[in-house]
Image (tube, grey):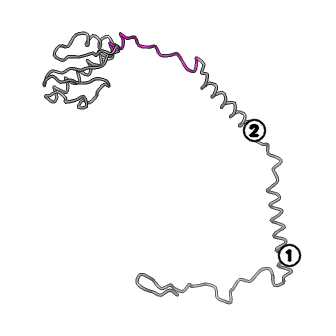
Amino acid sequence: MLSSGPGWAAPSQPQSSLTEDDQDIPVIDLTSTEDRETILAEALAHTALLEAQYKQPLIDEKRTGRWKAPLAIIVFFLSGYLLAFPPGWVAGEALPEASVSAREQGMRAALYVQAQQVEAFRVRRGRLPASMDELQATLPGISLVRSNNRVFQLVTPSVDGSQVIYDSSRPTDEFEAAVSALDLPR
């Protein structure tokens, strides 16, 4: 019996509805050894019979799934062939390469759009941004060069290796023309 200490409750005595006179009475008299061995032999024989029944395949059912493995192999090899040697209807046509003049026009349009963002920043904040990182949206490859609080230049490398420069003090019409030639929705 457990001792009751701090935090422990003493176990209570189980209350049983059966008395010693109402114990279970065995249904089969198993007092003799022969009776026990006979019942054990019958139980083992019954278990062996059930196990033998479960091990036999069912005769009525058809074997299903015979078509799955060959179909999977065919699909695997077909997809591998299409991946290695794609026909024209799968790969599609190659994208046309942009001409040098079209890329130059795109660069000028990008510089003009970025210059408009710098001007909007200057109007809102009363100063030019210290770097391109202060703008909400920046285009890659464009750098900002400040001359003073009102004048700036945007510089990007050209296709031929030279630089395309947008000067805010002398903006040329070619930058605005590049944007209008792009046919962008406004």
Is 115 situated above or below 71? above
In the image shown, does 171 or 22 lie closer to the viewer? 171
> Which residue lies at the image location 64% right of the left edge and 85% below the top edge?
18
| Neighbourhood count class around disc 2 (C-alpha, 10 Å): few under 14, some 14–19, many 20 upward | few
Q: Earlier in the sequence, mark 1 or mark 2?
A: 1
In the image shown, does 156 or 107 lie closer to the viewer? 156
The percent coordinates of residue 151 (x first, y second) are 15, 21
Element on which disc 1 rests: helix
Q: Residue pushed farthest bottom? A: 21
Is disc 1 in contact with disc 2, using a CB cutoff of under 8 Å? no
> In the rendered structure, which amino acid carries the disc numbered 1?
Thr
Q: Quadrant of residue 55?
A: bottom right
Is 97 situated above or below 42? above
> Which residue lies at the image location 25% right of the left edge and 31% below the top edge?
133
Segment colored magenta: 88-106
Residue 80: give its label.
none
| Neighbourhood count class around disc 1 (C-alpha, 10 Å): few under 14, some 14–19, many 20 upward | few
Element on which disc 2 rests: loop
Residue indicated by mark 1 = 38
The verdict on residue 105 being magenta is: yes
Q: Quadrant of residue 165?
A: top left
The verdict on residue 91 being magenta is: yes
> Which residue lies at the image location 82% right of the left edge and 57% below the top edge?
53
Disc 1 to disc 2, how far (Cα)? 48 Å
Residue 115 lies left or right of residue 95; in this view the side is left
Residue 152 lies left or right of residue 70; in this view the side is left
> In the rendered structure, which amino acid carries the disc numbered 2?
Arg
Residue indicated by mark 2 = 66
The percent coordinates of residue 10 (x first, y second) are 47, 85
Q: Quadrant of residue 71?
A: top right
In the image shown, does 113 or 20 lie closer to the viewer? 113
Is 66 situated above or below 150? below
